[in-house]
């Protein structure tokens, strides 16, 4: 089976009602990254950080996968599909994708602040100040903050280097190391970039840019790939 690797960003979930970060009206227009998405913010303003992610989590429970998520799940009928997502939502999983690697963590999970391996599914949307792991430390959102390591980047690099077809959907390719993954895909591999604001990426060969929203562009491309088989 041919291997399709798909790198997704906030744009794939935009039509599900989840705000992107850098578009106009995006999350980073409303909040300072330094105030809510760094370890320093956690140390100095824990309540605000907890509240920020509680609001994101609460909203996630009200959202559903869109046509793009479902189309990617459909692709598994004839391809070995590996999703690599920068998103912390679980919309790929809820649409039925079976292999999803989260680069920036998972919103519905929390973890210990003294032992990174103690990861829990949070029941419901609300993490509270005072919620602790078995070792007694405050639980934090299981997300990667700016300045923190991206533990899953190595498997993501390996997967990207083994793709037969590569898709990039709804990401501004601004945040590294995720943005560098395209550079690990061999030159001869066909690559598709689906983003209404997408453009050629310097140094990347064999790239087709599809300037469409994910909800339209992804099902169309998936249909084409399934027909080619
Ligand atoms: P951005 O907000 O930087 O980029 C969103 C991209 O989605 C843009 O290129 C938009 O043009 C595109 N877009 C908007 N609506 C779309 C739609 N309906 N269909 C397809 N594309 C659409 O989001 P990311 O690139 O995902 O990290 O951001 C990367 C990381 O920066 C995030 O994971 C997060 C953020 O800070 C952390 O929090 C660590």
Image (cartoon, rainbow, N blue to C red):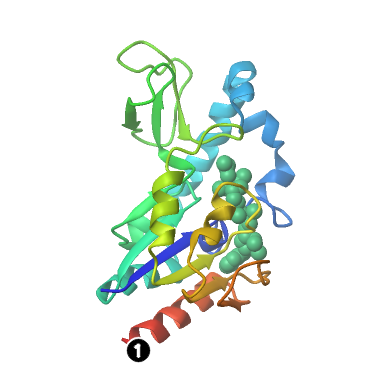
Relative vertical location of residue 175 with respect to residue 196 in this rendering, above or below = above
Relative vertical location of residue 2 with respect to residue 147 in this rendering, above or below = below
Q: Position of residue 82 (x, y in %)?
A: 35, 61
On the question of residue 90 being in view, the answer is no
SS for callout 1: helix
- Identify which residue, 165 or 222, lies in the foreground: 165
Determine the residue positioned at 56% across, 34% down. Answer: 145
- Identify which residue, 50 or 174, lies in the foreground: 174
Mark 1, residue position = 227
Q: Quarter of the image containing the C terminus?
A: bottom left
On the question of residue 178 being in view, the answer is yes
Q: Quarter of the image containing the N terminus?
A: bottom left
The residue most toward the front is 187
Image quadrant where residue 135 sits: top left
The residue most toward the bottom is 227
Relative vertical location of residue 220 with respect to residue 53 in this rendering, above or below = below
Determine the residue positioned at 63% across, 77% down. Answer: 211
Q: Position of residue 117 (x, y in %)?
A: 33, 26
Q: Position of residue 3 (x, y in %)?
A: 33, 69
Relative vertical location of residue 82 with respect to residue 197 in this rendering, above or below = above
Determine the residue positioned at 69% across, 31% down. Answer: 34
Dot 1 alpha-carbon crowd within 10 angstroms: few under 14, some 14 to 19, many 20 or more: few
Q: Position of residue 15 (x, y in %)?
A: 54, 64
Q: How many marks?
A: 1
Quick check: is the Cβ at mark 1 less than 8 Å away from ligand 1? no
């Amino acid at each position: 089976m041919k291997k399709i690797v798909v790198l997704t960003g906030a744009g794939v979930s935009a039509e599900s009602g989840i705000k992107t970060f850098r578009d106009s009206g995006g999350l980073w227009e409303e909040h300072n990254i330094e105030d809510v998405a760094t370890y320093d913010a956690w140390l100095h303003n824990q309540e605000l950080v907890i509240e920020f992610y509680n609001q994101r989590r609460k909203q996630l429970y009200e959202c559903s996968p869109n046509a793009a998520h479902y189309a990617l799940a459909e692709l598994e009928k004839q391809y070995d599909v590996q999703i690599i997502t920068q998103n912390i939502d679980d919309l790929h999983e809820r649409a039925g994708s079976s292999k999803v690697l989260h680069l920036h963590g998972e919103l519905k999970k929390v973890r210990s602040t003294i032992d990174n391996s103690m990861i829990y599914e949070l029941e419901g949307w609300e993490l509270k100040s005072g919620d602790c792991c078995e070792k007694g430390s405050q639980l934090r959102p299981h997300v990667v903050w700016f300045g923190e390591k991206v533990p899953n980047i190595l498997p993501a690099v390996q997967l990207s280097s083994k793709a037969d077809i590569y898709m990039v959907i709804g990401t501004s390719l601004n945040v590294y190391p995720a943005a560098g993954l395209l550079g690990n895909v061999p030159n001869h591999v066909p690559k598709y970039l689906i983003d209404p604001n997408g453009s050629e990426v310097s140094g990347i060969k064999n790239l087709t840019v599809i300037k469409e929203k994910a909800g339209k562009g992804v099902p169309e491309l998936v249909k084409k790939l399934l027909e080619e088989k």
